[in-house]
């Protein structure tokens, strides 16, 4: 087996240098593949690739018109983030979010959610979205696992007087995943959605963090 694979030179980097080097490699790979990203979307797509090592996201991540300025404004104005998994919740930089006045939530593990879901014969994700809709401030929904969360949000948005401020729709899987994403893609709700089966909690968190870091960087530079 020796000699079958090319031996790559080991790079000895400090922890803070690893991410910078990773993004350099991603930029080089995109250039080799002749993939040119819109300037506003570039950092988000690159962070998703960084989280997944999957360059397909450069083709399949879909942004509604004005999505990036819209989600950045929500963060700067103190919007909360609601996830559909504790994994996504753990991955979001809550300190940076708090600096802007926002808070991250996940209701999936609450006993009340499990009880209501069982009584009504629906998913916990659907019940969680109903609970999140009661938050009395703008909410960014970061959905990386449950297509039923997207379906419920689409349903709730059809009711008078409420709609999600923004949806990050990147659930992963095979059952109802693509159809649920298409509901959001075809809606007027501001969104970032990954078309197809791919996604995951790590992708949802990566998108949130890309926006948070961009807002923090702009805040630090004193730019308006």
Image (spheres, grey):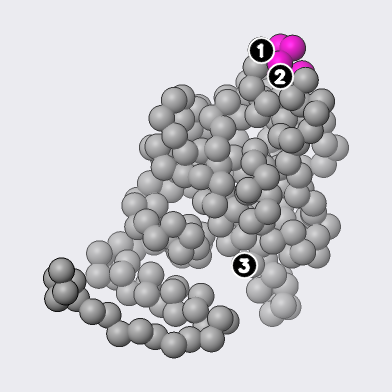
Q: Would you say residue 73 is visible in this rendering? A: no
Q: CA distance from mark 3 to mark 1?
A: 41 Å
User: Which mark identifies residue 214?
Assistant: 3
Secondary structure mostly seen in the magenta stretch: helix
Is residue 154 shown above or below 21?
above
Residue at horizontal 82 percent and vertical 41 percent from the top: 137
Q: CA distance from mark 2 to mark 1?
A: 6 Å
- Tag 2 residue: 117
Residue at horizontal 83 percent and vertical 57 percent from the top: 101
Left or right: residue 118 versus residue 148 is right
Residue 35 placement (x, y as % from top left) = 30, 62
Q: Quadrant of the C terminus?
A: bottom right
Q: Magenta region: which residues?
A: 116-120
Residue at horizontal 71 percent and vertical 52 percent from the top: 74
* Circles 3 and 2: CB atoms closer than 8 Å: no
Residue 34 placement (x, y as % from top left) = 25, 65
Left or right: residue 192 versus residue 23 is right
- Tag 1 residue: 121
Q: Secondary structure at mark 1?
A: loop
Q: CA distance from mark 3 to mark 2?
A: 37 Å
Is residue 74 shown above or below 12?
above
Q: Quadrant of the N terminus?
A: bottom left
Left or right: residue 151 versus residue 99 is left
Between disc 3 and disc 1, the foreground one is: 1
Sequence order check: which comes first, mark 3 or mark 1?
1
């Amino acid at each position: 087996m020796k000699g079958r694979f090319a031996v790559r030179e080991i790079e000895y980097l400090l922890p803070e240098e690893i991410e910078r080097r990773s993004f350099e490699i991603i930029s080089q790979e995109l250039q080799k593949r002749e993939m040119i990203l819109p300037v506003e979307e570039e950092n988000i797509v690159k962070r998703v690739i960084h989280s997944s090592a999957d360059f397909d996201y450069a083709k399949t991540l879909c942004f509604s018109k004005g999505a990036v300025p819209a989600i950045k404004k929500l963060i700067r104005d103190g919007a909360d983030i609601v996830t559909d998994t504790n994994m996504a919740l753990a991955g979001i930089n809550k300190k940076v979010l708090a600096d802007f006045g926002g808070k991250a939530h996940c209701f999936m593990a609450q006993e009340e959610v499990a009880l209501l879901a069982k009584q009504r014969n629906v998913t916990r994700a659907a019940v969680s979205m109903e609970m999140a809709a009661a938050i009395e401030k703008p909410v960014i929904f970061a959905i990386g696992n449950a297509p039923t969360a997207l379906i419920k949000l689409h349903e709730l948005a059809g009711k008078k007087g409420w709609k999600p401020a923004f949806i990050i729709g990147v659930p992963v899987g095979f059952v109802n995943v693509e159809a649920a994403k298409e509901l959001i893609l075809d809606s007027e709700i501001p969104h970032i959605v990954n078309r197809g089966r791919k996604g995951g909690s790590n992708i949802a968190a990566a998108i949130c963090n890309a926006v948070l870091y961009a807002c923090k960087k702009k805040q630090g530079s004193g730019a308006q």
